[in-house]
Amino acid sequence: MLEKVEILMIEMIRTLNDDYIIELFRKIPKGKRLRAKLVLKIAGDSEEAYKLAAIIELIHAASLLHDDVIDDALTRRGEDSINALFGNKTSIMLGDILYSTGYAFLTSFPQNISYKISNAVALLSVGELLDVELSKKFNDNESIYMDMIYKKTASLIEAASVSAAMLCGKDIKIYETYGKNLGLAFQIIDDVLDITQDSEKLGKPSMHDFKEGKTTLPYMHMYGKLGVKDKTKLLGLFKKDLDESDRIWIKNHMGETLSLDYSINMAKKLGLEALSAISVENNNSLSKIIKEMIEREF
Ligand code: FPP
Ligand code: MG
């Protein structure tokens, strides 16, 4: 099923008649293709659904090419990132090529679908900019964090879900609630895994978010629970290169303040909201996506 999406993505890029672009595209570390899976599980396996899935994955791949430049990330999914292999300029331009190719194919879809996807890409970019701005100082405002992760991550997942529903005439509201909550939970679990998993499992350096200036939900919750002295200690570690004793201090205090449990429970709550939205649809694959996403280890 997903193999066909891979083939379509290559076919779309091939329309540019440039072998070097194909060669670069093949070097992008492959992801879970969550957004494509969503489209196909909602809209079924029509030609149009495959095309929509491929377009959304091209856009998602483009956003990560840009994100790895912004985050100075040298690895992605355990492999060298495109910016590590070919430099920032290539990574940015390949990103531009992929999302504009996706847009060219999006023009053949009905306007409500093409608007939903294009609007989500604008939100993605607003979210990424917010993430950059928030990284400048420690953020302890949970609603600002939720707004940022909605835009940065959930908006495209929501758009995948809604546009698939539009494609096959399903109830938009149901799939909006499902996609939005799945997307929010996905990013929270991502932020938890950054702390709990080792770099081998993650395919990127572990506990890197705090060093990058990202005050994710577990850090925010922990800060709220710490006494004055420990608050100062945590602020002192913000954006610093952590040594082993700093990592142990953070992990111990995450445990004492139940901050990982708080964050996982928040993701589970959002997951349950997504599950309840689609309960009337009797689609086991969509429930499975939620469960697997919450229980994932990388
Ligand atoms: C990963 O976040 C980043 C995103 C989900 C979105 C990035 C969006 C842009 C760069 C906007 C530009 C969009 C296009 C289409 C060119 P993360 O750094 O928290 O996650 P990571 O650990 O996977 O890197
Ligand atoms: Mg990143």
Image (cartoon, rainbow, N blue to C red):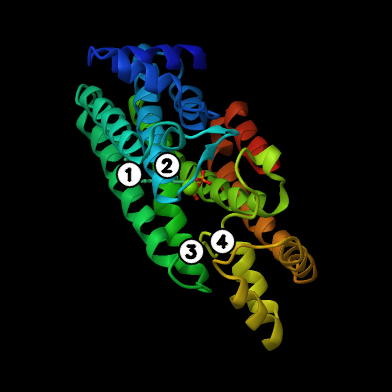
Mark 1 lies on residue: 120
Of mark 2 and mark 1, the one earlier in the sequence is 1
Image coords of residue 134 (percent x, y): 43, 66
CA distance separating discs 4 and 3: 17 Å
Residue 158, numbered label: 2
The residue lying at 76 percent from left, 68 percent from top is 249
The answer to the question of whether label 2 and label 1 lie on touching residues, with beta carbons closer than 8 A, is yes
Kindly state the secondary structure of the residue where label 2 is placed: helix
Image coords of residue 92 (percent x, y): 31, 38
Type of amino acid at the residue the image marks with label 3: Tyr
Residue 64 in the image: above or below residue 272: above
> Nearer the viewer's eye, disc 4 or disc 3?
4
> Nearer the viewer's eye, disc 2 or disc 1?
1
One can see residue 123 in this view: yes
CA distance separating discs 2 and 1: 8 Å
Type of amino acid at the residue the image marks with label 1: Ala
Q: Quick check: is the Cβ at mark 1 less than 8 Å away from ligand 1?
A: no
Foreground residue, 170 or 87?
87
Of mark 4 and mark 1, the one earlier in the sequence is 1
One can see residue 296 in this view: no
Mark 3 lies on residue: 145
CA distance separating discs 2 and 4: 29 Å
Foreground residue, 296 or 14?
14
CA distance separating discs 2 and 3: 18 Å
Residue 215 falls in image quadrant = bottom right
Mark 4 lies on residue: 211
> Nearer the viewer's eye, disc 2 or disc 3?
3
